[in-house]
Amino acid sequence: MTPLDDFDLAASTVTGLVSGIESWDAPTACTDWDVRAVVNHLAHGNAKVAFWAGMGPPAPEGDYLGSAPVEAFAASVAAARAVLASPGLFERKVTTPLGEVPGVFLVHMRVNEYVVHGWDIADATGASTDLLPELAARALEQWRARFGDTPRQPGGPFGPETAAPPGATAADRLAAFLGRKAVNA
């Protein structure tokens, strides 16, 4: 699979979850955010792709979902994908909050966000958290390499690692590594 294939798979999975949301104010494993806030965070991240790629203005904090959140989210995915499919983007350098990286890194950032926050949405809405096994396993490897044994504190974007249950799926192991505790266990 190509990086854009990974993006398409992750984006379609999360878009499917978003289209099934009935309770936008349900709590999530991201303790400061309800379901709507998690989806808005993803839409905001999608808006940032153009800026990071040097193809658009900054995307300030705010409501990216409006009165039609399902449609707004789908539009944000389409806009991000259009930027990510730009000729030459993968090979050139872009500036992200993590520094200067090859443009293909933007795809990996979105895929990882979709897998992690897709898990948050699935858990909060009672859907299966067995999401995107191959992408989740790869994301877990990437996060383990990034964090290593560095301690993480409560209150940060990623809490201390929690124990994954025996036989946990790749997505459940990823969520546990990033400090998530299921709200619908």
Image (cartoon, rainbow, N blue to C red):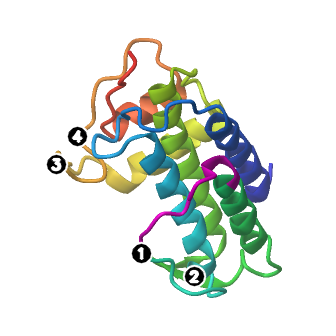
How far across and how far down the image is residue 68, in percent? 64, 52
Of mark 2 and mark 3, the one earlier in the sequence is 2
Residue shown at 35% from the left, 36% from the top = 177
How far across and how far down the image is residue 79, in percent? 72, 68
Q: Quadrant of the C terminus?
A: top left
Q: Is residue 94 left or right of residue 34?
A: right
Q: How far apart are marks 1 and 4 (CA)?
A: 22 Å
Rendered image: mark on residue 110: none
Of mark 3 and mark 4, the one earlier in the sequence is 3
- Residue type at the position of mark 3: Gln
Rendered image: mark on residue 160: 4
Crowd band around label 3 with a 10 angstrom C-alpha radius: few (<14), some (14–19), many (20+): few
Q: How far apart are marks 1 and 2 (CA)?
A: 11 Å
Query: Closer to the observer: label 1 or label 2?
Result: 2
Query: Relative to the observer, which residue lies in front, 33 or 169?
Result: 33
In the rendered view, tell whether residue 67 sits above or below residue 180: below
In the rendered view, tell whether residue 179 sits above or below residue 89: above
Q: How far apart are marks 3 and 4 (CA)?
A: 6 Å
Q: Count all numbered tags in the image, as a single digit.
A: 4
Labels 1 and 4 touching (C-beta < 8 A): no
Of mark 1 and mark 4, the one earlier in the sequence is 1
Of mark 1 and mark 2, the one earlier in the sequence is 2
Crowd band around label 2 with a 10 angstrom C-alpha radius: few (<14), some (14–19), many (20+): some
Q: What stretch is highlighted in magenta?
A: 61-71
Residue shown at 41% from the left, 32% from the top = 26
Q: What element carries label 2?
A: helix
